């Protein structure tokens, strides 16, 4: 019996002016959500004006990943603006179905999220 491939998730951070952009790819579930949570915490330590979590390359977003996004929004408070890029059935649809779009600002593109956070 072969072991299944481990679930993979990668998070890469880059800075656009005063905004920290976290590009997430792969699967965000209960095994990989802590990686996203730590990346958001690390980004916040650099005192950005805002943090954008770009889920454009995410293939599967589980409730654990959604929970990380809501917790990050609450933890950052008013000090750091927070937005999520989500478009399509793997990310945007589940976020909207459970009402996270009412708590966290969602944008279909990174450009739209950056514009919203810098104006």
Image: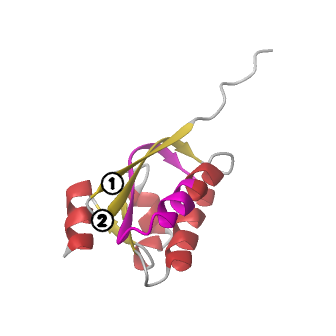
> Residue at 43% across / 81% down in the picture?
79
- For label 1, the SS is strand
Q: Position of residue 83 (x, y in %)?
A: 37, 67
Could you say which is closer to the camera, residue 10 or residue 66? 10
Q: CA distance from mark 1 to mark 2?
A: 7 Å
Q: Which mark is residue 18?
A: 2
Question: Is residue 50 one of those drawn in magenta?
Answer: yes
Q: Is residue 18 visible?
A: yes
> Residue at 49% across / 66% down in the picture?
44
Check the image and name the residue furthest to the top. 1
- Say if 60 sits above or below 97 in the image: above
- Say if 58 sits above or below 105 in the image: above
Q: Which residues are magenta?
A: 39-62
Q: Is residue 42 left or right of residue 79?
A: right
- For label 2, the SS is loop
- Asked whether the residues under the numbered discs 1 and 2 touch, taking CB atoms below 8 Å apart as contact, a structural biologist would say yes
> Residue at 63% across / 58% down in the picture?
64
- Say if 16 sits above or below 25 in the image: below
Rate crowding at label 1 as few (under 14), some (14 to 19) or many (20 or more) other CA atoms within 10 Å.
few
Give the residue number, with chain letter if any, for mark 1: 15
Q: Position of residue 96 (x, y in %)?
A: 42, 67
């Amino acid at each position: 019996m072969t072991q299944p491939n481990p679930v993979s998730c990668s998070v890469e951070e880059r800075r656009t002016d005063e905004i920290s952009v976290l590009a997430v790819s792969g699967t965000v579930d209960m095994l990989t959500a802590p990686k996203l949570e730590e990346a958001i915490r690390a980004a916040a330590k650099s005192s950005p004006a805002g943090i954008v979590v770009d889920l454009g390359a995410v293939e599967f977003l589980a409730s654990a990943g959604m929970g990380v996004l809501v917790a990050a929004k609450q933890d950052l408070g008013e000090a750091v603006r927070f937005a999520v890029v989500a478009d399509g059935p793997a990310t945007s649809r589940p976020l909207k179905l459970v009402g996270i779009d009412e708590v966290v600002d969602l944008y279909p593109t990174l450009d739209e999220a950056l514009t919203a956070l810098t104006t």
